[in-house]
Amino acid sequence: MVDITDIEKAARRLDGISVRTPLLQNFELDQIAGGKVLIKPECLQVTGSFKIRGAYNRLSLLTAEQASNGVIAWSSGNHAQGVAAAGSMLGIRTTIVMPSDAPKAKLENTKRLGGEVVTYDRYTGDREVIARKIAAERNAALVPSYDHEHIIAGQGTVGLELAQDATCLGLPPDQILIPCGGGGLSSGSALAIKSTLPNAQIYAVEPAD
């Protein structure tokens, strides 16, 4: 199980690696909400998303033997770029299984960041099966996009920073809305936030339909 200590350790590993994104206030949103709204823009993060946090934390905890065999991940784009960037920083070979129709910019950026891209047809192939087969052939470590304790701890540093910075601003939030895909960001952040702001209400947000 992941606990707050794991997230605090992840934050120390990420110091100087990931961007401590600011909390921004917007007058128009405040007017709509009838209160103060703070935004944590992870679009300003390394590679453009929070994914570098979990990827770097996972890769930095590999043993020397595991690191020498490289890692395998599967992603449509954001996790792919995070894994490739983390691998380049740590000198670890990265291979990412991506759909052939993924956004061209994300495919190219993953390669530019040092990742080896293996494409597949999302309508006939299973990316996880493909990735696990490659991992078995190379004895490589898997880097899931969310379902791993080191990934969750890394993504949880978003919530840790949010809670700390909001408190320093004298604006401890009543409600916190966290985008939720696989759940790594929302679960890790919720854990970190509740350890500091136990009364805050947390909502995982998904697109309608």
Image: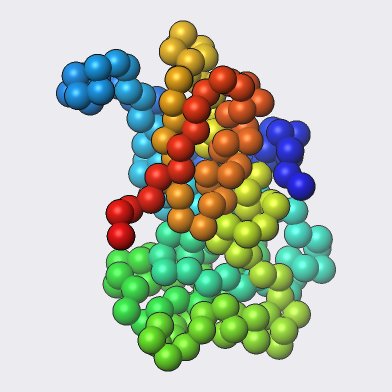
Is residue 165 left or right of 31 when viewed as pictured?
right
User: In which image quadrant can residue 26 be found?
Assistant: top left
Residue 123 visible in image: yes
Which residue sits at x=32%, y=17%? 36
The answer to whether residue 148 is left or right of residue 169 is right
- Residue 23's x, y, as percent? 39, 25
Inspect this view and state whether residue 157 appears: no
Name the residue at 44% across, 26% down: 175
Seen at 40% across and 83% down, the residue is 122
Spot occupied by residue 104 in the image (x, y as percentages of width and height): 29, 72
- Nearest to the observer: residue 193 or residue 18: 193
Residue 104 vs residue 10: left or right? left
Of all residues, the one furthest to the bottom in this rendering is 124
Color scheme of the displayed model: rainbow
Q: Is residue 96 above or below residue 33?
A: below
Q: Position of residue 39 (x, y in %)?
A: 35, 30
Taking depth in this image into account, of 17 and 171 the one nearest to the observer is 171
View extreme (front): residue: 209
* Residue 53, percent from left and from top: 56, 47
Please name the residue shown 77% across and 68% down the image: 66
Placement of the C terminus among the 4 image quadrants: bottom left
| Quarter of the rendering containing residue 192 | top right
Give whichever of 88, 149 is nearer the camera. Answer: 149
